[in-house]
Image (spheres, coloured by chain):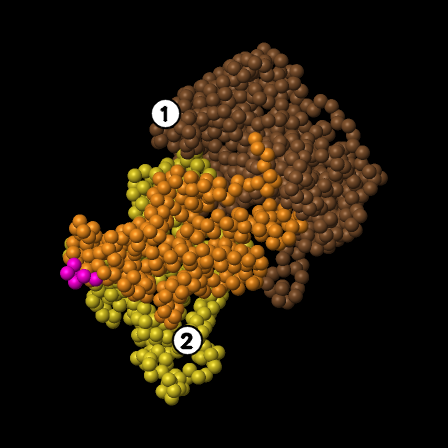
Chain colours: A brown, B orange, C yellow
Amino acid sequence: MKDMVTKEPLIQVRDLSVGFTGRAGHTLPVLRNIDLAVRRGESLGLVGESGSGKSTLALAMMGYLKRGLRVIGGGTHFAGLDMFTLSRKELEGIRGGRLALIPQNSGQSLTPTLKIGAQLSEALRLHSKLPEAEHSARVVQLLEQVRLPDPSAIAGRYPHELSGGQQQRAAIAMALAGEPEALLLDEPTTGLDVTTQAHILELLRDLAAETGMAMVYVSHDLGAIARVCDRVVVMYAGEAVLEGPVREVLRNPAHPYARGLLASIPKLTDARLPMALEGRPPPPGKAGDGCAFVDRCAIATDVCRTSRPALATVPSGARVRCHHADRADSLPTRSPADADPRVIAEDAILSLGDLSISYARPGFLDQILGRKPATTPTVDGITIELEKGETLGLVGESGSGKSTILKAVAGLLPPAGGRIELAGDGVLPPLVDTRRPDQLRRVQLIFQNPDESLNPRQTIAEILAQPLKLYFGLSGEALRQRIEDLLESVRLGAHYMDRLPSQLSGGEKQRVAVARAFAAEPDLVLCDEVTSALDVSVQAAVLDLLDQLRRSRNTAYVFVSHDLAVVRALSDRVAVLYQGRLCEIGPAAAVYAAPSHPYTEVLLGAVLEPDPDTVPTLSAADIVELSPPARGCPFQRRCPRKIGPQCDTETPPWQDDGHGHAIRCHIPREAL
Amino acid sequence: MAVASTNARPSVASRFLGVIADITSRPSGAIGLALVTFHLFLAIFGPWLAPYDYKAVDANLMMQAPSGAHWFGTDHLGRDTFSRTLLGGREAILVTGIATPIAVLWGGFVGIFFGLVGGRLDDVLMRVVDAFLSLPWILKMLVLIVTFGTGIEVLIPTLAFFYGIPVIRIARAATHDVVARDFIQAARARGHGRMTIIQRELLPNVRDALLVEGAMRWSWMLLAFSSLSFLGFGVSPPTPDWGLMIADARGFMSFAPWGVLAPVIGLSSLIIGINLTADALAKALGIDRAQKAPV
Amino acid sequence: MLRMLIRRLALGAITVFLVSLIIFAGVEILPGDACTAFLEREAQGQLLENCRQELGLNRPATERYLEWAAGAVTGDLGVSANGQKQITELVGYRLRNTLLLASCAMLAGIPLALFLGVVAALWRDRMVDLTISTIAIGAMTIPEFVSATLLILIFSVWLGWIPGIVLTSANAPISEFFPEIFLPMMVLTFVMTAHILRTVRSSVIEAMASDYAQMATLKGVPYWRIVFRHVLPNALLPAINVVALTIAWLLGGVVVIETVFNYPGLGRMMIDSISDRDLPVTQAIALIIASVYVGVNLAADLLTMIANPRLRTLHMRKG
């Protein structure tokens, strides 16, 4: 692969600035003076958080800008052609042919009314010299190349009939149809499950090696970048702040932002909390005359406020936009030290006994005949104990039933069987309507997306007042004081009180949601993917906040996430779920180490670390299962270590090590 | 910064002014609001502004062309068309102005209620609403008017009743949208009572949709009212009303077109004004109603 | 799919049944009946009693409803109150004439609306769009009797091109309605076009801004191919339901238009029957119009289901 890298750049972006006209008539830049080159056969990563301009830059390389945006300076060339001066006809010839895009969300980027086959042969018609008659054979061949099972059947399906991973593969096949020299990938694996993501990335690596295509890989995920890219550009507030070889950027970045970003990423091998990067990037047009990162930078000096640093080459060969690049290595890229261990009392707060939940509602006919549906429950046989002040991580891919369990504990979904017991209150009634106010107070739920969970028509003070009035009957000055304290405890000032949620950033909104849960002074907080909608630096801040709160109040958490590294950072114990059934449970360190359940092994193997030298192991196919099997082990259909018919027919036994680490598998513990 | 009380929210008055400012910041909204305000002004102060008595018949002045004395000419009974046009919207605005809020209130109430209850009862109600909607409005209205008369004591409840039915649908749909969102779930999980959830969490989010709906209902009700007048089932002579004036003047259109044109301009400008305002209001409140169907 | 079809048909049937109940109950609750209407001032004492006896109005309401509904299902709508004529006969030609008017308006209006809606969307915020959208708002908001009156003023009074009033009798052959049908048709087309084109415009704008349209652009698909192959099949789906609702609305709007132009259709007959308090005829017309409304909406739902692969597979999976 390396020997295909030649000197002449295939894509050359020169001093490109892109902006839009704001309300007051000023031009607000979203990209500022971008300079970069992509050589043939090379793979370049564009990394940054939301709003950093990375997608805009990738699309600009195709000569495309979203409605409202325009070039305010510089330009971009592809194979010597100035993309912003080409005619529409010339652009149509290049796009999808020599230069192809793989979009972020294939589910929405494939035309819903056209079959996959039709969309691929359209690409062939436009960009290949193959005679019409050979198109359908080529379509099947392309679908095969992206490792889709039964390609001729897939060609005859509509996009919505495919799973997310299959849609993404179809989009890759479409991009390959024109035999491109360069491929632009705009967050191609965002929103996919970890195993699917790992499979797609391996596919892309292999394709790049086979065909010698150049790739521009846009992502917020340094793990994915580490796996596929040779070189990385770090974007911040519309600027390229750091550019260099992938090892250099991920091991010892010379820019303060890149170091902070790296430190804020939770790592699978590291049980410590990631380090938060406080503050947020300036919005377009607000970067000022100095460095855009100055307000968040620990080593900033006066010169950083007054003059904008230029992109300069440092001794290591990287290019950095920083006045103090030489001092950057004083900043840590990992959390400095272990936090003090917390004391967890051996005193259960929550216990779930053989909990099962069924989404299947009886059909009309069943209702008339009074029959119960015979389907297998969505979630089954959940037995978990949680101690006071303990954090239990619940991990699993989408559809594993982890959020469903939280909803049942919170009383929003009726369990089909089993019991939910809260220490001191005994067995809880199934639904909120039948629980006592004090029982409700002790268990609080935080949702994934604060845009949905905060009422857009209420001010922050009103939102926080709800639980205070309801549970403690506070009013007047006492209420106001308490709200102020709560805001303080989540590091928001009293001046947030009269704002509406829409006036807050994503991280601030989630802090309000956290404050609202803690307003009830709960014993147990249920966290449902609470950091999934947030950027990684903001995620670190919220994780840190959750850690502080549990330390000061001895609150127990059930922390649900699909991200194994995040779970590792916060949890004392971890439970792994597949298809609504527990596979493994135990102390975090034990679960993340061998021996593990085959499914845990698959999950851990697929996680991408922000380190170019870790290689994921892909041991199971990334099939999406819609419902759990009726009998036997839930993982029977995908298990790479299946030993025989007992996996299909018998429920595997729990194998305990005597220290609370249990694995549910037919394979003897020693052999796992 | 001043310390605010815990219940402080952007007050209703300031939000109202904000919305008005947003509406007038769009040219179409500004024109619309100006037209509506102008018509409301005329409806209130018309009697003092009209230069002639609207019912003063003069056989010597029949079908006069517009002149300095009679700006819009005179009608077939020699009455001043300008004065009658000035006053021609009063009855319509009075009736629809009272009936619209009633329609939105009762339709909104029922819609929210059934949207929350859901299940079989909701299914049955939607069938009944569909059944009512499948009958043309004019038939429903006329049957009642022919039976009970054309006084405003009949027109107001009739309009309010029939125009509240489609509001049920809108309110129900808006309720369903809001109920599915997590903040309602969060309130349920905290254990708030049903009424509190409706009042604090649901209503503020459904209110805007109903407000826009109300503006639209108003314009359709005006259409219905003047159509009824035109057909002879509305305001009774000699009370001036645009619909009735158009019907009367139609016969003389070939030689006295001003008799038709004056009330046409009056009626159209009011309805266009309401529509432009409703459009701007929807945009100001962040609700797009371009997709809405004309029912 | 079949299961869905049956479900929709059943829902439609339930709606028509409910309409028939509402119509019947409405007439029952309101003061007066066919006899008081027919006899007018003489409606008292023995005369009234005889009449009621003769028409069977003394029987319980449920019995009369069942008889009426059973008749309606078999196509027998009863007899009119004042003329004692078969309603089916009275209504037949009127219904034909109204359907003629509505179909003419649809034939002209739907293609025009689709065309103008797409044009306005593709040239969004340009002069063409502003003109089309402004006229559409005008057409939607100005009452039909106003636009009808203005058209008569322009085309028959001032220009003298087309007669402003239809003088053809109700049972004349279709050919005799031309060219008189032209003005009422124009008014209907005008309003209908406005409603449909507004929906088409906004749904095309939305589809043009979609991820798949952007993807097609970045795949090098030529502009007009994107419009016709990627955008329009998706954007026109919601138009189907709006067309249906507009047709349903036409049935109400046509009443006023028929009256203005003296057009011998169902709408004018409805006004006459209400004024004459001929309740059996009113009931029959109401039932016909409601059935057409339900039928058109049902057809639109099915059409959307067939045209939208997403819905199609969804229902297949369920079924």
Q: Residue at x 61, y 28 (%)?
A: A537
Residue type (three-letter) at the residue carrying disc 2: Pro
Q: Is residue C158 left or right of residue C208?
A: left
Where C40 sits versus B87, above or below? below
Name the subunit of mark 2: C
Residue named by callout 1: A85
Span of residues in magenta: B57-62
Q: Residue at x 55, y 15 (%)?
A: A304
Name the subunit of mark 1: A
**A283, A309: nearer the viewer:** A283
Q: Which mark is residue A440?
A: none
Between tags 2 and 1, which lies in front?
A: 2
Residue type (three-letter) at the residue carrying disc 1: Thr
Residue B144 in view, yes or no? yes
Q: Position of residue B266 (x, y in %)?
A: 29, 52
Q: Is residue A158 left or right of residue A70?
A: right
**A359, A583: nearer the viewer:** A359
Q: Position of residue C227 (x, y in %)?
A: 37, 41
Where A497 sits versus A280, above or below? below
**C149, C123: nearer the viewer:** C149
Q: Badge 1: few (under 14), some or many (20 or more) residues near its Cα, within 10 Å? A: few
The quadrant holding residue B147 is: bottom left
Residue named by callout 2: C31
Q: Is residue C64 magenta?
A: no
Of the 4 image quadrants, the one containing the C terminus of chain A is top right
Q: Is residue B58 magenta?
A: yes
Q: CA distance from mark 2 to mark 1?
A: 78 Å
